[in-house]
Amino acid sequence: MRDRDSAPTPDESVFPRRRLLRDASILTGGAVAAGLLGADRTLAGSAPATRPVIMLRQTSATPVAAPMATPVDLDTYAPTALTDDELTTLKAALDRIIPADDLGPGANEIGVFVYIDRALASRYAAQLSLYQDGLAALDTAAGSGGFAGLSADAQDEILTNAESDKLDGAPAGFFTTLIAHTREGMFADPMYGGNVNFAGWDLIGYPGVKLVWTAEDQAIDSTPKPEHISVAQYGGTPS
């Protein structure tokens, strides 16, 4: 999954994290980071879908106490839309799309699978069957051990076929939707379930919610200090 207009670099993997991070960071206005980017605005080209909406119930500039955005242990997370087996397959795919590396934690460590599962139980419920059929196609292509049991190279080969719409049984739009939701889970406000510990924002240098920007913050080449504040701390709720 490389840039169509440039050759891959020697260290570029099948699903290069650097391109995903770059694509996210070039979006203007912090749309991805604020959680305002729906599937109809993603770079992955998926079909339009209902976008996450942030409801602000307070206008005070003072953060208020709010529950943790992801109040679950990622290691013991119980899915609400997908089955346990489907979640295992999803996590295996996410681990190849954005693995942990020298840049920081990968998609699973950031809780992208939580974001996707919760979204499939709510605003993206209409796409649940798309995921179920697509994940089943990954497992079928993998054989008796399932997709999660394959080597990284074998998983990449199957995902490459899915990207090229050559994966038997995979519904149209499955891979592009998966990529779009992976970006959302990485960089949306943590209250949606992903971007745990604001790690996604840190990867692209987004400082978080700031209601006041100082002259120093706006200076050329300045790097604002990360605030690590969710919209939830100002009374925002996903709906």
Image (spheres, grey):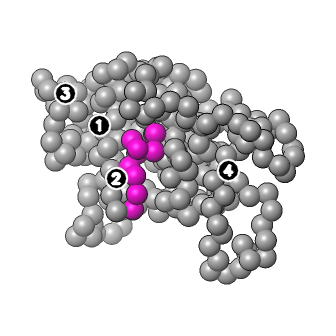
Q: Residue at x 15, y 42 (%)?
A: 151
From the image, tell me which residue sits under label 3: 146
Residue tagged 4: 229
Q: Using a 10 Å C-alpha cutoff, classify the residue at mark 3 as few (fewer than 14 neighbours), some (14 to 19) or many (20 or more).
A: some
Amino acid type, callout 4 = Ile
Q: Nearer the viewer, residue 101 or 155?
A: 101
Q: Are marks 4 and 2 in contact (CB under 8 Å)?
A: no
At x 14% / y 26%, what residue is drawn?
145
- Where is residue 74 drawn, in percent x and y? 43, 34
CA distance separating discs 1 and 3: 10 Å
Quick one: quadrant of the N terminus?
A: bottom left
Query: Are the residues tagged 2 and 3 within 8 Å (C-beta)?
Result: no
Q: Residue at x 55, y 31 (%)?
A: 71
Label 2 sits on what residue type?
Ala
Secondary structure at badge 3 equals loop
Q: State the mark number for residue 200.
A: none
Is 19 on the left or on the right of 203, as rendered? Answer: left
The residue sitting at the left extreme is 144
Relative side of 85 to 34, left or right: left
The residue that mark 2 highlights is 100
For marks 1 and 4 on the same chain, the one whose residue lies earlier in the sequence: 1
Query: Where in the figure is residue 48, as x and y percent of width and height?
Result: 56, 37
Q: Nearer the viewer, mark 1 or mark 4?
A: 4
**Residue 166 figure quarter:** top left
Which portion, as a residue range, is magenta?
103-112
The amino acid pointed to by label 1 is Ala
